[in-house]
Image: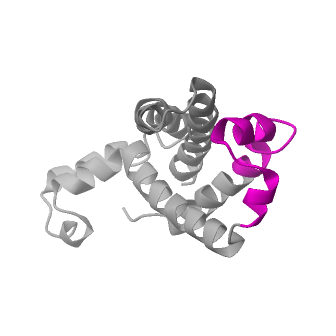
Amino acid sequence: MEMNFISVLVAATSTLVVGAVWYSPMLFANAWMKESGLTEEQLKKGNMLKIFGLTFLFSVMIAMIMQVLSIHQFGALGMIGGPDYIETAKPSYAAFMADYGTVFRTFKHGALHGFMSGLFFAFPLIAINGLFEHKSWKYIFINAGYWTVSMTIMGAIVCGWV
């Protein structure tokens, strides 16, 4: 089993699409700017190539680990030492993959893992930083909500794309 890099790239791109909607004036742009203490003028001064380029790179990293978290067969692969050891693995590995190689490889299952990752990883990380930065709960929920939605979509893409 190898990582599906096309699904990783699509999942990473989805974070930019979700962000364009989430942080738009029709949803949370005004509340987020107020809670973060930023103005439109300040935001326009940013180096957009750097911001979006690094955002995409970091999203690729998240999508790669999301694939491992949401596809259980990567666990079996890890138990034999990785892809370099498939040929020398015991017959039980081949039997397991023959029986369960595509089990739970659905968009729905991936979305569940993505949602749980957003709720139990992203939210606490953002909340901890927000608390130390003296940010409001509104700020924390806006950003954690974005990542929970994004990770749900990412999980669906990387797990369901067989």
Picture layout, residue 123 above or below residue 160: above
Residue 122 sits above or below residue 20 on the image: above
Most frequent secondary structure within the magenta stretch: helix
Residue 74 drawn at (x, y percent): 32, 52
Q: Quadrant of the N terminus?
A: bottom left
Q: Nearer the viewer, residue 48 or 69?
A: 48
Asked whether, in this view, residue 127 is left or right of residue 56, the answer is: left
Residue in the image at 60% along x and 56% along y:
11
Q: Is residue 94 visible?
A: no
At a point 12% along the width and 57% down the height, the residue shown is 90
128 part of magenta stretch? no
Compared to 149, does 56 lie above or below?
below
Q: Is residue 136 left or right of residue 45?
A: left
Percent coordinates x, y for residue 140 in the rendering: 56, 32
Q: Quadrant of the C terminus?
A: bottom right
Q: How many marks?
A: 0
Residue at 23 percent across and 64 percent down: it is 82
Residue 72, position as x, y percentages in the image: 35, 43
Q: Which residues are magenta?
A: 18-45
Residue drawn at x 45%, y 49% as measured from the top left? 66
Of residue 62 and residue 162, the one placed in the foreground of this image is: 62
Q: Position of residue 103 (x, y in %)?
A: 43, 40
Q: Residue 4 versus residue 17: which sits nearer the camera?
A: 17
The quarter of the picture where residue 7 lies is bottom right
Q: Nearer the viewer, residue 90 or 65?
A: 65
Residue reaching furthest right? 26
